Image: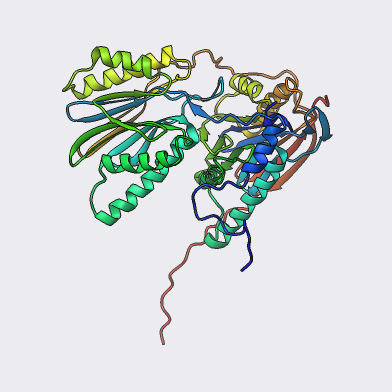
Amino acid sequence: MSQSSYDVPAKGGFSFDLCKRNDMLIQKGLKSPSFLKTGTTIVGLIFKDGVILGADTRATEGPIVADKNCEKIHYMAPNIYCCGAGTAADTEAVTDMVSSQLRLHRYQTGRDSRVITALTLLKKHLFSYQGHVSAALVLGGVDITGPHLHTIYPHGSTDTLPFATMGSGSLAAMSVFEAKYKEGLTRDEGIKLVAEAICSGIFNDLGSGSNVDICVITKGNKEYLRNYMEPNPRTYVSSNGYSFTKKTEVLRTKITPLMERVEITEVTGEAMEE
Amino acid sequence: MSIFEYNGSAVVAMVGKNCFAIASDRRLGVQLQTIATDFKRISKIHDRVFIGLSGLATDVQTLYQRLVFRHKLYQVREERDMKPETFASLVSAILYEKRFGPYLCQPVIAGLGEDDKPFICTMDSIGAKELAKDFVVSGTASESLYGACEAMYKPDMEAEELFETISQALLSSVDRDCLSGWGGHVYVVTPTEIKERILKGRMD
């Protein structure tokens, strides 16, 4: 058997073969790249009939806004959603991975997933990487045992709370919750409070911005309100658009016509008769 | 200096009406010395999906070769081309696999999906996908590109207007960046043809 380190796509998990080269480049004085972070304000609260999760939609790369409308509320199971703050690739990868593990588990057990299952899978993974997988999550859902809301920190510790906030805007959002939260909120009161908390993060924290996403999960039902509120619309665009005085100079042009896409339809003819 | 500023690059992709455009600069440098003015950053994966890679040039070429390999494997197994959304997920997975020792490049993926709907996305060096409905940028000139595209872009442009807009955005942004420029390379793809154009820019 030949020892080939590359040919077959890896069986999963992380691969560390470029680490030595990257360390060598860093020693030569080159700074390592900055990753896309979701500066973020993410919140969750438990209301009378279930859980409401909320998030802003700004993704930053250093001081620059890389994505003005990203999705931070990730699907885990039909009755469980998870908001993610921290390094964007880590939150996406970890929630996708646990979401597939939950689905396989659902097939195996034949039952709906429980929030505590998602929590345990997430904290196991994050703890085993000792905080290097930088994902801070707010996990919420409604299962057979009732509504649950948890926060998970990058090192793997978890909290179970009636209302929670995470991310750089968490202090701004928490101040709204501490002032106005009470038990037994109705759906509309809950949505209003979550939207207010996220807006507080959007307007006061530089790492959060753009729009408000909300997800309401109740027993047997979920509502994902993408861009529920857009408190920062783009109003300065001129309707005529931009007109260029000088046309671009082109040196060479090459046109490749694309083949017409042919649809092959099977014509079921009659069977041949003897 | 950052690892991405070692070679210098600028890549941008924009969405039009049933078409998309992807453009890059052509300089390859070693810090402040230019060694080539015809470096290919944008490559075709198949007729309807293009990938532009910015960042360290060696990783640009290696990553491109690996992606072409994976796509050919997919074509052999599935007997069809990859959809751009699927390809973006593949690139994201390949980049995230190297989370703790990443490929030092940032891809920009552009393609025509089902019903000729254009799709663009970009990723950071560890695979965090950023889908956009209007434009995506990457490279050392990215800050200028963000500004130029925000000002010049408007939705539902036809192929010719889209070409003009993306070229103007690219050339004006690389003029403000020492490490990228030396011309431009633009692909405008509609459901019936791929138009590849080399732009004349400032050679400084």
Q: Can the viewer see residue B189?
A: no
**In the rendered image, which quarter is residue B190 located in?**
top right
Q: Residue at x 63, y 22 (%)?
A: B143
Q: Residue at x 62, y 59 (%)?
A: A7
Residue B51: percent from left, percent from top = 63, 42
Task: Work out whether A185 lies above or below A50.
Answer: above
| Residue at 18% across, 21% down | A185
Image quadrant containing the N terminus of chain B: top right
Q: How far from the left and from the top, in percent, is residue B26?
A: 76, 34
Name the residue nearer the viewer: A41 or B15. Answer: A41
Looking at this view, is A23 or A7 the one in front?
Answer: A23
Report whether residue A273 is seen: yes
Q: Quadrant of residue A175?
A: top left
Q: Nearer the viewer, residue B151 or A177?
A: A177
Left or right of A117 on screen, residue A167? right
Residue A156 locus on image (x, y percent): 38, 35
Q: Quadrant of the C terminus of chain B?
A: top right
| Left or right of B135 on screen, residue B40 | right
Residue A142 in the image: state x and y as whole percent.
23, 37
Residue at figure coordinates x 58%, y 46% from the top left: A16
Tell me: residue A110, above or below residue A41: below
Above or below residue A243? Residue B113 is below
Residue A92 shown left or right of residue A262 in the figure:
left
